């Protein structure tokens, strides 16, 4: 399983740094956060470091009004769901191919996808038209459909099974899945998490490539369905899907506290809590293992009080994404059973560490994995019952 970079506001320099360090990688470009000229420039820089790009059209909310998003040439001048016909679809796809995917030399073609809370014949008919026109327009690149699913749909097992049945009738190479979270940054809803595992497993068992966008470290358990990649970025709105970001600019970029990701605890900590760790003699327990080769956070463990050193937002983002890539890359093992056991062990280790840290006043607050570890363990156990046998049998073929 790989980690792809979900482009967020002002993320260009960070993408270049990480792709250069990795000497490979995929960036999912964001029309909401970039003009076409910026995309062209970044894609060339990424290519120099052996990286690749794709474009997410972000057509989730057709009546979105974010000034940068709707200024792109592929965005319809007017949208009426009753009139969104084959000709309109073809025009949008033609513009996406000619002005964007061809120019940017994208790795594959991501189709526009509507945010939906219901799957029915109307949804299927639109998707069918989209795919038919896409196959006329794009004859070289692999085509990925976009599934942008509401939290209500993600919590409805029956509707998700209907979705898988509809998808069986479509011809496409991959799926770019964008699920709306049911709760906050780290979900506390085991059914949502179980359904995400079940849906991705259903897609993989049908031979499809699967990338789950707007992800965070809680989604590492998707290694159980052996998906191809998760995508994550700098700000929280690149790690947790929110339709509000596609309307005219929010005020600021949310909370500006700097965080340090402790991969062995699967938890992010604000820097003042590292000061507490230093005072209580536990700072070395939070230090990232050298095998991660992440030098972005070294300054926090240089001997000085962590809040006094020059640890910036960009360092925080780079460290998080670099560690997450390492964790994603080693999450899938040689069998379903080995992957399950490894994930369970990783979570149990995180529980022990976060409990010890909390006893000593070191708290991850709403990003503390200890708050949701039992949710993940529950989802893994249930998923093993539902899909374990099938995945064990087909592991080497998906």
Image (tube, rainbow, N blue to C red):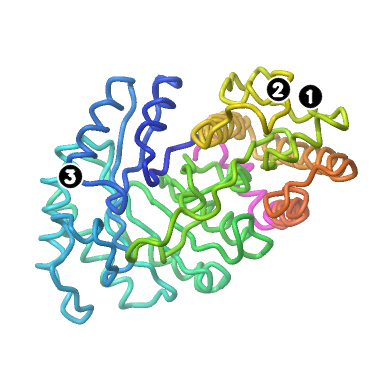
Q: Secondary structure at mark 1?
A: helix
The structure residue drawn at horizontal position 52% and vertical position 48%, both measured from the top left corner, is 215
Where does the magenta region start and end? 383-398
Furthest-front residue in this view: 308
Q: Position of residue 137 (x, y in %)?
A: 12, 51
User: Could you say which is closer to the camera, residue 17 or residue 102?
Assistant: 17
Q: Secondary structure at mark 3?
A: helix
Q: Which residue is mark 1?
A: 284
Which corner quadrant of the image does residue 88 belong to?
bottom left
Furthest-bottom residue in this view: 82
User: Could you say which is closer to the camera, residue 39 or residue 392?
Assistant: 39
The structure residue drawn at horizontal position 56% and vertical position 58%, both measured from the top left corner, is 196
Q: Earlier in the sequence, mark 2 or mark 3?
A: 3
Of marks 3 and 1, the one in the foreground: 1
Q: Dots 1 and 2: beta carbons under 8 Å?
A: yes
Left or right placement of residue 168 versus residue 191 in this view: left
Q: Which residue is mark 2?
A: 301
Question: Compared to 294, does 351 lie above or below?
Answer: below
Q: Dots 3 and 1: beta carbons under 8 Å?
A: no
Q: Which residue is mark 3?
A: 100
* Cα separation between marks 2 and 3: 44 Å
The structure residue drawn at horizontal position 27% and vertical position 67%, both measured from the top left corner, is 65
Q: Earlier in the sequence, mark 1 or mark 2?
A: 1
Left or right placement of residue 250 versus residue 385 in this view: left
Q: Dots 2 and 3: beta carbons under 8 Å?
A: no
What secondary structure predominates along the stretch shown in magenta? helix
Could you classify mark 3 by the number of other residues whose Cα lies within 10 Å: few (under 14), some (14-19), or many (20 or more)? many
Q: Position of residue 367 (x, y in %)?
A: 67, 50
């Amino acid at each position: 399983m790989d980690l792809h970079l979900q482009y967020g506001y002002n993320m260009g320099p960070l993408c270049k740094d990480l792709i250069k360090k990795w000497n490979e990688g995929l960036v999912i470009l964001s029309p909401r956060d970039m003009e076409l000229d910026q995309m062209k420039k970044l894609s060339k820089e990424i290519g120099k470091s052996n990286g690749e790009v794709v474009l997410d059209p972000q057509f989730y909310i057709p009546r979105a009004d974010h000034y940068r998003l709707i200024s792109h040439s592929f965005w319809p001048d007017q949208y009426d769901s009753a009139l969104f016909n084959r000709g309109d679809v073809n025009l949008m796809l033609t513009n996406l191919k000619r002005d964007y995917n061809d120019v940017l030399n994208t790795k594959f073609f991501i189709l526009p996808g509507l945010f939906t809370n219901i799957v029915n014949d109307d949804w299927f008919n639109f998707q069918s038209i989209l795919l038919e026109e896409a196959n006329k327009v794009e004859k070289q690149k692999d085509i990925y459909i976009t599934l942008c699913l509401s939290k209500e749909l993600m919590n409805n097992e029956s509707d998700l099974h209907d979705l898988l049945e509809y998808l069986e009738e479509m011809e496409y190479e991959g799926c770019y899945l964008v699920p709306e979270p049911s709760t906050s940054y780290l979900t506390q809803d085991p059914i949502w998490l179980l359904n995400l595992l079940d849906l991705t497993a259903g897609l993989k068992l049908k031979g499809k490539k699967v990338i789950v966008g707007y992800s965070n470290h809680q989604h590492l358990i998707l290694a159980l369905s052996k998906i191809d990649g998760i995508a994550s970025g700098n700000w929280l709105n690149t790690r947790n899907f929110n339709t509000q970001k596609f309307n005219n600019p929010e005020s600021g970029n949310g909370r500006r506290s700097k965080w340090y990701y402790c991969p062995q605890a699967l938890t992010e900590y604000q820097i003042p809590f590292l000061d507490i760790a230093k005072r209580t003699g536990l700072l070395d327990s939070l230090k990232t293992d050298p095998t991660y080769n992440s030098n972005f956070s070294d300054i926090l463990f240089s001997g000085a009080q962590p809040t006094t050193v020059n640890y910036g937002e960009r360092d925080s983002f780079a460290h998080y994404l670099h560690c997450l890539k390492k964790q994603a890359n080693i999450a899938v093992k040689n069998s379903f059973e080995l992957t399950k056991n490894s994930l369970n062990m990783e979570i149990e280790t995180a529980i022990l560490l976060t409990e010890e840290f909390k006893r000593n006043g070191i708290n991850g607050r709403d990003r503390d994995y200890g708050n949701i570890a039992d949710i993940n363990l529950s989802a893994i156990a249930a998923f093993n019952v539902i899909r374990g046998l099938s995945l064990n049998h087909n592991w080497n073929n998906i």
